Image (tube, helix red, strand yellow):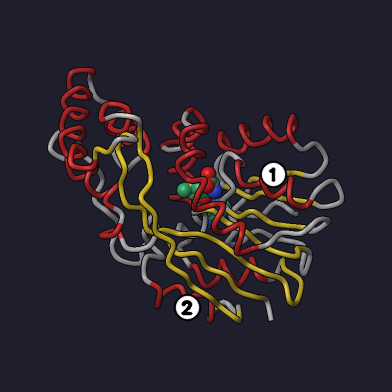
Amino acid sequence: MARNLVINVDQQQFWNEVKGDFWVTLKPRIDLLLSPFGSAALNALSAAPDERILDVGCGTGGTSAELANLVGPGGEVQGIDLSRPMLEKARAEAAVSSPGVLSFEEGDAEVQEFIPNYFDAVFSRFGVMFFDDPVAALGNIRGAVKPGGRLAYVCWASRQDNPWIRIPTGAARQFLEIPPAPPDDAPGQFAMEREARILDVLGRAGWSDVSVEKFEIEHNMGKNLNDAASFICQMGPMSEPFGNASQALKNKCIAAVEQALEPFTTSRGIDMKFSTWIVSAKNP
Ligand SMILES: C[S@@+](CC[C@H](N)C(=O)[O-])C[C@H]1O[C@@H](n2cnc3c(N)ncnc32)[C@H](O)[C@@H]1O
């Protein structure tokens, strides 16, 4: 893949300077949290031995490594991401787990000059909600896929149906200056929360046979209140203000989040509802 300019510069700054190090440090925990959703999207993709797969917004490369196992030594997996620290982590782990099969490119998938018609399929776990112009981005990505090639990804569904992020963020707001949620449809975690928007964007980007299936589970956030609250304060939209806060403020914030999570205590720890869309499509 040739290097290209980046037009999603706000996201580039965000995933390099704000979020990148959190995701690297928390990689094992984040991979555990996101794994059922990635698995559901991997099932929808059905990657086969010897295929070439593109992993968009691959981050620290957890799903790229899973894809490398599925395509085997005769296949190829390329991850693309804007975040240098996350890619460094992905490359370090790939060198051990899948040498030769897996490679990573630092770039903006919206404008990256991919080799035309190269990949058999495109995958993403929560990496397609951050484009300034999603129609242009998903059209550019489609150009990298062979005719008849597949797309499968998972993105977050309605923010109302994702209390695991809404409730802790709300509780932390009384202590931290958390950036306001982006407006509807603006790039961000919930940019693709509406099914109608997914259908519209993919249709206008030239994909066909689009399927959008709700995938919802009760999922474990932590083994107890403190474990779940400490984790979510570092992962959610409060991660940056939380990271910069004094220890006293951090303690107050964690206590408030623990209180908010208390109703979700089960015998397993803290279990909450997670709601996603599993999206699949074809390049006609
Ligand atoms: C929520 S994280 C998901 C990371 C990874 N897929 C995972 O599941 O662990 C979103 C990722 O998308 C990447 N990203 C955002 N906008 C991008 C763009 N325009 N081009 C490439 N990657 C992008 C971010 O850098 C980040 O790594």
Residue furthest right as drawn: 74
In which quadrant is the N terminus drawn? Answer: bottom right
Distance from disc 1 to disc 2, alpha carbons, whole Å, reads 29 Å
Task: Give the percent coordinates (x, y) of residue 73.
Answer: 85, 46
Up the image or down, 221 lies above or below 213; here it is above
The answer to whether residue 6 is visible is no
Left of 207 or right of it: where is 132? left
The residue to which callout 1 is attached is 104
Task: Give the percent coordinates (x, y) of residue 9.
Answer: 48, 51
> 264 or 66: nearer the eye?
264
SS assignment at label 1: strand
- Asked whether the residues under the numbered discs 1 and 2 touch, taking CB atoms below 8 Å apart as contact, a structural biologist would say no
Query: Is disc 2 surrounded by few (<14), some (14 to 19) or many (20+) residues within 10 Å?
Result: some
* Residue type, label 2: Leu
Q: Residue at x 66, y 62 (%)?
A: 122
In which quadrant is the C terminus drawn? Answer: bottom right
Q: Residue at x 49, y 38 (%)?
A: 32
> 201 or 161: nearer the eye?
161
Circle number at residue 199: 2
Up the image or down, 212 lies above or below 232; here it is below
Q: Disc 1 or disc 2, which is closer to the eye?
A: 2
